[in-house]
Amino acid sequence: MFRMFLILPLFLFLSSLNAKEDSCRVQIGKKYYPIKLVPIANNSFKIAYLDLKSNPHLVEALAQEIATYIRSHRKKIDILVTPEANTISLAYAIHKKTGIDYVILSKKQRPNMGEKAVFENVKSITTDTLQKLWLSEDDKKKIENKNVLILDDVISTGNTIRAMEKLVQQAGGVLSLPPLVGFYEGSKWDNITAISPTILPLTPITHSPEVVP
C-alpha cells in the first residue's frame, strides 16, 4: 500500500507531461485555446489539429478577429474564397458578422459544377496523395472582376494557398490583399497575413530503432 502511494504521484506527474506534449495553446484575440497535437498521414510529424467542424468556440473566436480585419479592409474585399471542409463553418460565421459572400472550393468534382469548372492539383502536408481543388462554373462568375480575399485555417507548405490563387486568377478575380489564415504553421510567411500571433508547432516524431534479435 505504501508503495502505491509513492507510485501514484509519479504516474500522475508523467501523465501530465504526456498531456502537455500532446497539446498546445493558441492565442486568438486576448484568449487562449487548447489544441491537440496529432500525427499526420506519413507519421513523421505531429501537427496542431484545428478541428473547426466540431469546435464552435474556436470558430467564433477566429470569426470575430477576422471580421475586425475585414471591416478595416472592406473596400478591398468583395468575396471570400476558401477550401472545403474545415473552413466552411468559419466562412459562414464571418458572413453572418460582415455580410461578405464566400465561395467554397470543392475537393471533388460534382455533377452540378458545369462544363467550364476548373481545378488545380494540391499536395497537402496532411495527406500522402495528390488532391484537387475544384471551382465550379457558377462560382467562377461570382469571382470574376471581384476583389477576392483568400482564406484558410493554416498555412504550412503554402501549396493550398498557391492553388487557390491560380483558380482565382483563372476566374478573373482580383487579389487585392495577401491571403489570410488563422495561423502560421512551422514558421512565419512574409506574404501571408495570420490572425493569430501563435505559430503552430510542426514537431518531428522520433522513432526508436528496431531491435534485431
Image: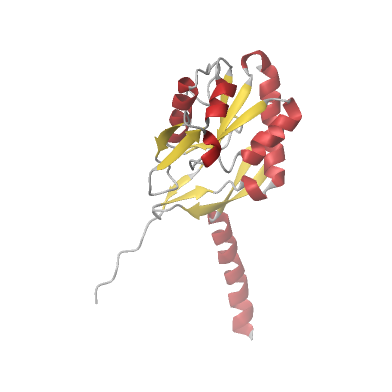
Judged from this view, the residue extending furthest toward the left is: 213
Residue 181 is left or right of residue 67, and the answer is left
Judge from the rendering whether residue 175 lies leftward or rightward of residue 124; answer left or right. right
Image quadrant holding the N terminus, namely bottom right
Query: Residue 179: where, in percent of width, then height?
Result: 53, 25
The C terminus lies in quadrant: bottom left
In the image shown, does 212 or 79 lie closer to the viewer? 79
Image position of 70 (left or right of 20): right
x and y percentages locating residue 20 in the rendered image? 57, 55
Would you identify the image quadrant in which residue 92 lies?
top right
Total marks shown come to 0
Residue for point 45% across, 52% down: 40
Residue, far right: 97
Question: Residue at horizontal 65%, vertical 37%?
Answer: 90
Horizontal relation, residue 188 to residue 104: left or right: left
Indicate whether 212 appears above or below 177: below
Q: Examine the rendering and report whether any part of residue 29 can be seen.
A: no
In the rendering, at what x and y percent does residue 98 appear?
73, 26
